[in-house]
Every structure is written in C-alpha cells, then in structure tokens.
Image (cartoon, rainbow, N blue to C red):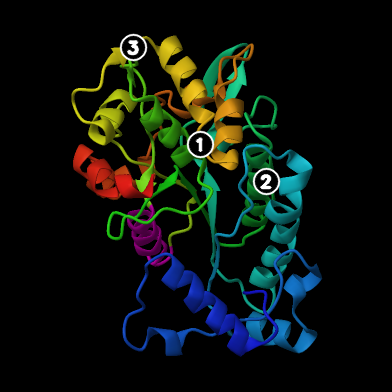
Amino acid sequence: LVRAADAAAGHARILDALQRHGIEPAPGWAERLEPVVGDLAAPGLGLDPAEWRRLAETVDSIYHLAASVNVLLDYPSHGRTNVAPLVEVVRLAAEHHPKPLFHASPMAVCRRRVEGRLEVLPEERVHADPAGLLTGYARSKWAAEQVLLAAAARGLPVTIYRTSHALPSARTGRAKPGDTFASVLRAARAAGVVPEWADSAFHGVPVDVLGRLVVEDSLGVGRHPGVVHVENRDPLTLPALLEALLGGDAPRVPLEEWKARCLEAASALPDEDATLVRVLFADRADGAAVENMFGRHPLQTDDFDRRGRGSALADLTPAAYWRRVQGAI
C-alpha cells in the first residue's frame, strides 16, 4: 500500500526508498512488486470498492509494519496513524477468508512507571490499561495491540512481533533519518566521555537482521501465537558501546556528569538532534527519559526458546558492529 497518483508512481516511490537506504533489489524482484495505491489513514485504506474486493479475495497474508514514531508527540497525534487504520486492516484481513495478520509493535508497550519504578511485562502479556506507559507513541501502540488481540479472540490469525529498536543495518551501515537513539549517540560522541553505568544496556537489533527474523518466523505454517518478542539477548552496556565509538581511551565520568556533558554538547548539534537531547536528558520526578531508554530490562523471548531458536537472538550487536556502523551516527 503506497500513497501515489498511480501504480507506476507508486512503484517508483518504493524503489526510490530502497535506493535511499542502500538496498539493491535482487534481479527480477522489482517486477514481482505490485504497488497498491491507497492511503493507510483514509477510510477503506483509500481503496475503491473494486480494488478492496480484489484484495479481500486474493491476498494470502497481511504484514502491517507502518507506524508514526515520535517521542515528542502525544497520543492523539499518533492515534490517527497507529490505531484508527487497524480497524480497516482487520476488516480486510477478515473479509472473504481469514488472512494471517502480522504486526510490528515496540517493546515500549511492555515498560511503564509504577510508583516511581520501571515495571516490565514478559512476553505474551499485555497491560490492562495504558497508565504509566512512558510516551504517547507507546500508548498508541498499546491501543493498536488491543484492536488486534480483540480480533484474535474472535478467530483471526494474528501475530504481534514486539521488537526493540531498529538499529543501523549490519550489512550497509545505513540508519533511518531522524532516529531518536542516533541523536543521543551523536551528543554522547560530541561529549567525548563515557558514563559509569554498568547496569545499562543498549537494546536493539540491526534492521536487516530484524527484518529477516520476522519474515522467517512468520513463514512458520500454522503458527499465530499472539505476541512474540524479538530482542537482542546480549546487548552491550552503554559504556562499552561508547568505547567502541570513541576508542578505549575515552575518560569515564559519573552518570550525572555524563548527562550534563551531553546536554552541553547538544548545543552544537543540528536543531532536531539538540531538541531531542534536551527533552530526553531533562530531569523529571521519575528520572530522565534517557535513563529509561538505556536501563537494563530483561525481556523474555519464550516463543523463540520453545522452538529451539533462541540462538538466533544472541550477540546481535557486538562492539565490532558499532565500529562498523559508526558513520551512520
């Protein structure tokens, strides 16, 4: 599904996006791609009735990975893209014949503040309400999960992949523009010091590895377990990551001094990066948001374990990975 004037323009738009991210389609791949001209946020996905019927009758499965992601925006801003369209997607998945529906959701829906402490839910569980979720984005994805799990309870085959942050590609080193975590790392690199923060962790999976894991898992015949966690089991601590970026001789300082140095360094960054850093490093009653971003929180990956695939989630971002992709930061 792509916003475009016609199918040819949609095809060109998709290929342009691939090229911007350094992805070279395999021979013959472009000819297999059929753009569906529409609009995710429009009634009926922006499709005319004849096209809707054709898709309802011929599609075998649906992957819904689109989302609005901005830690600075509130729930209503995200809800128009992240929640409302799910009703139409579910309707398409249920019409004519049930179609497996695969959806990407963030680990942020597992984490919330309860009486000043961070609480993390294990795999396959969902908070009963959105209270305590840390951002408007997380609340919107919680609501999206409610729509999908209600459809699953009525018999639609649904799999929700909760994933940690999509990091720069391990193959190309490319990162998505406007990335929140990259803004933090730019400020940290500019500060030139490493925090004393042994219990931190930089959770995340390289985007190409994440895509492969989700596709491979979704092709399992007859498996629609509800919620599956896809998480790097061996994340580096933030100090180890920064040492990989800065070199092993970068001085170590207390956490509070590191935060102050990053805030100071942010003034020399581009405006968007500087704004994000100021928001994420600002002191609040429950601690700066950056402390939640890099706090170590073990997230269960039971579904992968049960099928003997746990090793696929091991050691996905060693120090060598960060040295290879540092040009993207």
C-alpha distance separating marks 3 and 2? 43 Å
Where's the N terminus, which quadrant?
bottom right
* Count of marks placed on residues: 3
Q: Is residue 151 visible?
A: yes
Query: In front here: 311 or 195?
Result: 195
Where residue 48 appears, as percent x and y from the top left, is 78, 84
Q: Nearer the viewer, mark 1 or mark 3?
A: 1
In the drawing, what numbered circle is on residue 269?
1
Residue drawn 61% across the image and 85% down it: 9
Is residue 25 depicted above or below 179 in this figure?
below
Q: Residue at x 43, y 27 (%)?
A: 294
Q: Residues within 10 Å of mark 3 (few under 14, many from 20)?
A: some
Task: Answer with mark 3 or mark 2, whichever residue precedes in sequence.
Answer: 2
Quarter of the image with the C terminus is top left
Q: Which SS does the magenta portion mostly show?
A: helix
Under mark 3, the amino acid is: Val
The answer to which quarter of the image holds residue 27 is bottom left
Helix or strand or loop: what does disc 2 sit on? helix
Q: Which residue is mark 3?
A: 253
Q: Residues within 10 Å of mark 1 (few under 14, many from 20)?
A: some
Magenta range: 207-222
- Find numbered disc 1 in the image and state the secondary structure of the residue it sits on: loop
Q: Is residue 185 above or below residue 119?
A: below
The quadrant in which residue 257 appears is top left
Circle nearer the N terminus (1, 2): 2
The residue depicted at 30 percent of the width and 48 percent of the height is: 325
Tell me residue 321's x, y (percent).
24, 45
